[in-house]
Amino acid sequence: MLLRTDVFRHLRRWAPVLPLLVLLAGACSPDHYPQTALRPLSDFAKIGDDIQTKTFYWALGVFVLVEGALLYAVFRFRGRPTDAEPRQIHGNTVVEIIWTVIPALILAAIAVPTVKGIFQTSAIPTGDVLNVQVVGHQWWWEFRYPDLNITTANELHIPVGQTVSLRMGTADVVHSFWPPRLAGKRDVFPNRETRLWFKAEAAGEYPGQCGEFCGIQHGRMAFRVRAQTPEEFQAWAAHMQTLGPKPAKAAEAAPPAESVRTASAGAAVQAPQKPEPGKGAQPTAAGRDSAAAPAQPQDPAYAAGEKLFAAKGCIGCHSLNAVDPPKGLIGPNLANVGARSYIGAGSFKNTDENLARWIQNPQALKVGVLMPNLGVTPAEAKSLVAYLRAHQ
Ligand code: CUA
């Protein structure tokens, strides 16, 4: 009886804190954490999640049993000042065998699905797979599609329902490729290929992150995986195969500005110069805030940007060719930079303002990034933004 009134008195004291706890629990909603391994969306991610879920419930069972026995013993056998010394059971062989065997059995039970999962996730996929080469760089990700002859950076487009087979390496130090909703971490090493595969189950844009400390901007070595319907993916790939530098045109010779509106984003997208099947289906500019139509090749700002891209030396590190870009360039491929959701490897929303800030002073946004400050004025940055924005 004494115990119960004690408990109620405690509860009353903590009552004002309860709404706060409810709020805190609400903040734990998975919607606030898109980069979570606890909401798997691929066959690969589900293997890991299954093991974690099983282990969690077994651990919960162990916790309830152990804590239950402990609490029972604490209250049932609690000492009183008048008690004599209890019987000592030190060296009881039976008890020691029991508490050795039970944990061993628990570990064995966890090992069975774990080892099975390790073999499953280490297998090399065969059949109708999409091959992608992943190259880690300080601090961004390069994605090459050898069968489609496309190169891009920081945004990995994949089709839903088809296994993606990644062959991964690095251009410099060890990184770790980690798209939590689609697969577990896989380290990438110099001079050694690692493999990863997964089949996305739902279309969407999923954030990923370098999972291995790789230098001062390790934290800003993020990427996005854009899982698309097979049709959208095919259209995107076909569109990418047309991407190269779009030369400025003289105003009088230019055809009327032609643009298409994507259903998914409602964003104006510059039509590719060559007509090709499925144009307009790619969800370009989907994640951008500013969805204004990009500059056209006949705009003066565009022409000025094109000149600056060469004059300021951008061209020495960045290619605007998605197909067969020159080898050995150290900057991310920019063939579709205008359509990406983020710049700086997942660091900043790809708005005109952020892109201009980046071009003028990348070191202020991402200290230590290889891109130097090139002495670009605000007016020049505006022209460069107009030029780059049109490449999407
Ligand atoms: Cu790359 Cu951390």
Image (tube, rainbow, N blue to C red):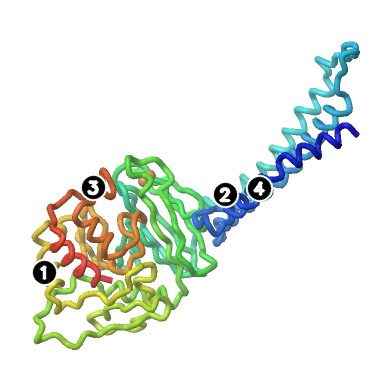
Residue tagged 2:
119
> Could you tell me how far apart the alpha carbons at marks 2 and 3 are, in whole angstroms?
43 Å
Residue tagged 3:
363
Rendered-image quarter of ligand 1: top left
CB at disc 4 and ligand 1 closer than 8 Å = no
Quarter of the image for residue 166 reads bottom left
Query: For this rendering, which residue is in front, 258 or 80?
Result: 80
Indicate which label's residue lies in the foreground, 2 or 1. 1
- Residue 149, above or below 169: below
Indicate which label's residue lies in the foreground, 1 or 4. 1
Q: Are marks 2 and 1 in contact (CB under 8 Å)?
A: no
Q: Residues within 10 Å of mark 3 (few under 14, many from 20)?
A: some
Q: Amino acid at mark 1?
A: Ala
Quarter of the image for residue 93 reads top right
| Disc on res. 113 | 4
What element does badge 4 sit on? Answer: helix
> Could you tell me how far apart the alpha carbons at marks 1 and 4 are, in whole angstroms?
60 Å
Q: Are marks 3 and 1 in contact (CB under 8 Å)?
A: no
Which mark sits nearer the N-terminus, 2 or 4?
Answer: 4
What element does badge 3 sit on? Answer: helix
Which mark sits nearer the N-terminus, 1 or 4?
Answer: 4
Query: For this rendering, which residue is in front, 326 or 333?
Result: 333
